[in-house]
Amino acid sequence: MTLAAAADTDTALVLIELGAVVLGLALLARASNFVGVSPIPAYVVAGLAVGTGGLVDLAFTEEFIALGAEIGVVLLLLTLGFEYSAQDLWAAVRASLPVGFLDLVLNFPPGVVAGLAMGWGFEAAFLLGGITYISSSGVVAKTLRDLGRLGNRETPAVLSVLVLEDLAMAVYLPLVAVMLADRDAATGAVSIGVALLAVGAVLLVAFRFGERLSRLIATRSDEVLLLTIFGTTLLVAGLAQRMQVSAAVGAFLVGIALSGPLSERAASLIAPLRDLFSATFFLFFSLQVDPADLPAVLGVAIALAAVTAATKVATGWWAAARIGVGRRGRARAGASLVARGEFSIVIAALGVAAGAEVELGAVAAAYVLILAIVGPVLARYADDLAGSRSPATPAPAGTSTYQ
């Protein structure tokens, strides 16, 4: 066989593999939408089924899928940033800082304690703490939309918790990147300082000049706007990764910097790309987890899920109570925050890639699977938690929902 023929064969194989993957993800997404749940668990299960040790061991072109996964998490965080303006962030921080502190105190330690109890090193336990701490903004937002609760009185309390968690990740991820790089204390401190200064600078620019930046980027052409935002996001994400800030946080900050009608238009243009590449991200993560490792950690994952579901309910309950919401609304707010998803997988993927702990990926996969399924179900029947099945109370006119 000539070199040209071999190259054609390799190209054909790549196209066939990718076509099969995308069609498979489409079927899973269709099935998930039909039953009204997030497709994230289905993507994770699919990766477990066709990866190493799964039911069918497909020889995927890993380099391409890995790149697609990286783009996926960048776009996930970019579109999440579109949801908030810098002013929203500042208002949420000022109004909800006590709730954010309670959220951290209740939900971070269970992961750390569980990791140390299993004999893991501090780095791996610290990663597990992050995994149990942060709710899934993607799953929570989808659940609120599907249940028609975006206008409810408790929804601003839920979104303020998500905003504070996302900001916390802007500090946490650079810290994790430095820890996993195994640097000496002085070098690590400098890297963390530079990373936090970069985050602060971008937030300041977004707060002071966000509208001007939006006007500068704005154009009538959807094509030009899409290419501009996509290219800028990848560039900033790459620079952020170089500075140990994390590409995901860099993309999140780009989303925040774009405000007003432009962010809404950009979100609609980016959404199809985000859905394609984010599905690849969840698939790629689970491809790296051997299903044979799951039974050994299932007990830990279930225990962690039970504990941190209760602590998230407590967080949301108090957050809603602080703004005068009744018992049913408090229960809905707490149940809405239970799901874990994209950020938990991002944290686990960092640890797996750095070889922090062999069992970390398996624990994270099982934990996210449980709560990504249980969370939306709890949210749907949240009124029962408060002893009532009364309909949701709509927000009064003018109430902000941070949509």
Image (cartoon, rainbow, N blue to C red):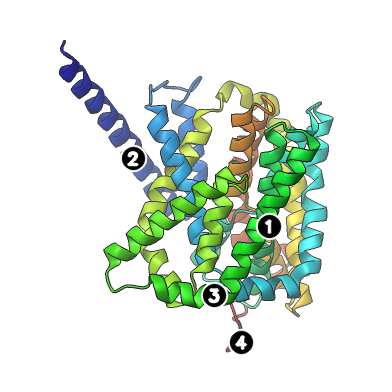
Left of 403 or right of it: where is 330? right
Query: Residue at the location (40% across, 48% down)?
Result: 29
Residue 381 found in image quarter: bottom right
Instruction: Report the residue marked by disc 2.
Output: 22
Q: Which mark is residue 209?
A: 3
> Residue, x 68% and y 76% (percent of image)?
91
Q: Amino acid at mark 3?
A: Phe
**Front-lying residue, 164 or 135:** 164
- The amino acid type found where label 4 is placed reads Pro
Nearer-N-terminus badge (2/4)? 2
Helix, strand or loop at label 4? It is loop
Classify the position of the N terminus by image quarter: top left
Structural crowding at the residue carrying mark 1, measured as other residues with C-alpha within 10 Å and reported as few (<14), some (14–19) or many (≥20): few
Cα gap from disc 2 to disc 4, whole angstroms: 43 Å
Above/below status of 178 relative to 389: above
For marks 4 and 3, give the one nearer the viewer. 3
In the displayed structure, does residue 349 sit left or right of residue 5?
right
Residue to which mark 4 is pinned? 396
Residue sitting farthest toward the bottom: 397
Whole-number angstrom distance, CA of label 2 to CA of label 3: 39 Å
Q: Are marks 3 and 1 in contact (CB under 8 Å)?
A: no
Q: Disc 2 versus disc 1: distance between alpha carbons?
A: 39 Å
Query: How far apart are the alpha carbons under marks 4 and 1?
Result: 40 Å
Q: What residue is disc 1 on?
A: 197
Picture quarter containing residue 13?
top left
- Whether residue 104 is visible here, answered yes or no, is yes
